[in-house]
Image: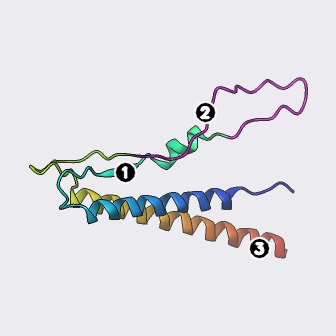
């Protein structure tokens, strides 16, 4: 039986969501700091695309995999903001709350999928 990587992927996604929520909270905490620029993470799917798994050649007739794909982690970027106030601060509370809600929804979806997969796996192993 092959290894199921769904749980590892869900763990990485939850870690990403935790870091994103921390970044959003830091943006909100600095909403009155002059010159503070709002930060955000690159989307999880973009970091997942950049960290593709390398295909292996198991038989001589198989195609040789392309090694041009680069690996990388999610990085903090300057967030796009709706407005910048006269003090140079670019944090929009409304936008940060929308991002926090989006992050919570992604966490809930991720948790629900893992719970369903776990239930299915347990029913398959019990027979």
Quadrant containing the C terminus is: bottom right
Residue at the far front: name it.
34
The one of 106 and 30 positioned closer to us in this rendering: 30
Do the CB atoms of the residues marked 2 and 3 lie less than 8 Å apart? no
Residue 60 spot, x, y in % from top left: 90, 24
- Residue hosting label 2: 70
Judged by depth in the image, the label closer to the viewer, 1 or 3, is: 1
Q: CA distance from mark 1 to mark 3?
A: 40 Å
Left or right: residue 57 compared with residue 34? right
Determine the secondary structure under disc 3.
Answer: helix
What residue lies at 55% left-to-right and 57% top-to-bottom?
13
- Residue hosting label 3: 123
Residue at the far right: name it.
60
Question: Reading the chain from its start, which is encountered first: label 1 or label 2?
Answer: 1
Left or right: residue 93 compared with residue 48? left
What residue lies at 49% left-to-right and 65% top-to-bottom?
107
Left or right: residue 116 compared with residue 16? right
What colour scheme was applied to this rendering of the protein?
Answer: rainbow
Residue 76 spot, x, y in % from top left: 42, 48
Q: Badge 3, how many Cα within 10 Å: few under 14, some, many 20+?
A: few
Judged by depth in the image, the label closer to the viewer, 2 or 3, is: 2
Q: Quadrant of residue 62?
A: top right
Left or right: residue 94 compared with residue 121? left
Determine the secondary structure under disc 1.
Answer: strand
- Residue hosting label 1: 40
Question: Reading the chain from its start, which is encountered first: label 2 or label 3?
Answer: 2
Q: Which residues are magenta?
A: 53-76
Determine the main secondary structure of the stretch shown in magenta.
loop
Question: Reading the chain from its start, which is encountered first: label 1 or label 3?
Answer: 1
What residue lies at 34% left-to-right and 65% top-to-bottom?
25
Residue 61 drawn in magenta: yes
Q: Badge 1, how many Cα within 10 Å: few under 14, some, many 20+?
A: many
């Amino acid at each position: 039986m092959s290894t199921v990587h769904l749980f590892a992927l869900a763990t990485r996604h939850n870690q990403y969501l935790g870091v994103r929520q921390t970044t959003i909270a830091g943006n909100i905490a600095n909403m009155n700091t002059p010159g503070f620029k709002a930060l955000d993470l690159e989307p999880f799917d973009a970091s997942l695309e950049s960290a593709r798994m390398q295909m292996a050649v198991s038989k001589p007739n198989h195609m040789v995999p392309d090694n041009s794909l680069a690996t990388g982690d999610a990085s903090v970027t300057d967030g796009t903001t709706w407005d910048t106030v006269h003090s140079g601060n670019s944090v929009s509370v409304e936008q940060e709350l929308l991002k926090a809600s989006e992050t919570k929804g992604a966490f809930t979806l991720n948790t629900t999928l893992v719970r369903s997969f776990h239930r299915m796996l347990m029913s398959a192993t019990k027979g």
